[in-house]
Image (cartoon, grey):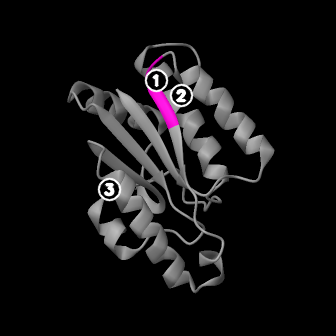
């Protein structure tokens, strides 16, 4: 299975990028994993929040269409424990899906169009920056695979 983390704009925080790279390396033991970053033109960032979200929507929809399963990471989504998240991943693997895409939107989130089209997953009731959640997501995806494989990374 190919798993994609689709994200808006690159991170400017080196520790986040280093952590993502570390967990990406670890994930190669279990699945094909890659991050795809959509760059938003800097002139868009000077526009209204609604205009920024519309531009991001256009870019995201152009990328998302090619994946079998898509989930949006969003603070209002359904929360899972690490074990429940692993179960969800296992169910998708068992269903024979060829690709799975997780999406991290921009700093202002998603438009209502995208929010209604795809299921939402939340990692916490806390709000994380759209940059920080990248690292948290990669760690949880790695943890999910270690749970699925019965490895010792996750302690319960």
Mark 3 or 2, nearer chain start: 3
- Measured along the vertical axis of the image, is residue 88 above or below residue 66? above
User: Residue 26, relative to residue 73: is it above or below?
Assistant: above
Query: Mark 3 and mark 2: span between their CA atoms?
Result: 21 Å
Q: Which residue is mark 1?
A: 145
Q: Residue at (35%, 52%) from the top-left corner?
A: 64
Q: Position of residue 62 (x, y in %)?
A: 36, 58
Is 70 included in the stretch rendered in magenta?
Answer: no
Main SS of residues in magenta: strand
Q: Which span of residues is magenta-colored?
A: 30-34
Answer above or below: position of 61 versus 2: below
At 70% across and 35% down in the image, what residue appears? 19
Q: Secondary structure at mark 1?
A: helix
Per the image, the residue denoted by label 2 is 142
Disc 3 designates what residue?
119
Q: Residues within 10 Å of mark 1 (few under 14, many from 20)?
A: many
């Amino acid at each position: 299975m190919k798993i994609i983390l689709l994200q808006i704009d690159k991170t400017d925080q080196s520790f986040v990028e280093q952590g993502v790279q570390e967990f990406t390396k670890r994930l190669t033991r279990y699945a094909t994993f890659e991050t795809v970053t959509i760059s938003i033109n800097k002139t868009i960032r000077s526009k209204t929040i609604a205009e920024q979200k519309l531009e991001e929507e256009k870019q995201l929809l152009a990328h998302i269409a090619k994946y079998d399963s898509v989930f949006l990471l969003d603070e209002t989504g359904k929360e899972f424990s690490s074990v429940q998240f692993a179960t969800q991943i296992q169910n998708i693997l068992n269903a024979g899906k060829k690709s799975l895409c997780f999406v991290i939107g921009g700093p202002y989130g998603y438009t209502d169009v995208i929010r209604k089209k795809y299921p939402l997953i939340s990692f916490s009731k806390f709000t994380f920056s759209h940059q920080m959640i990248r690292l948290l997501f990669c760690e949880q995806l790695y943890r999910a695979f270690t749970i699925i494989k019965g490895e010792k990374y996750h302690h319960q």
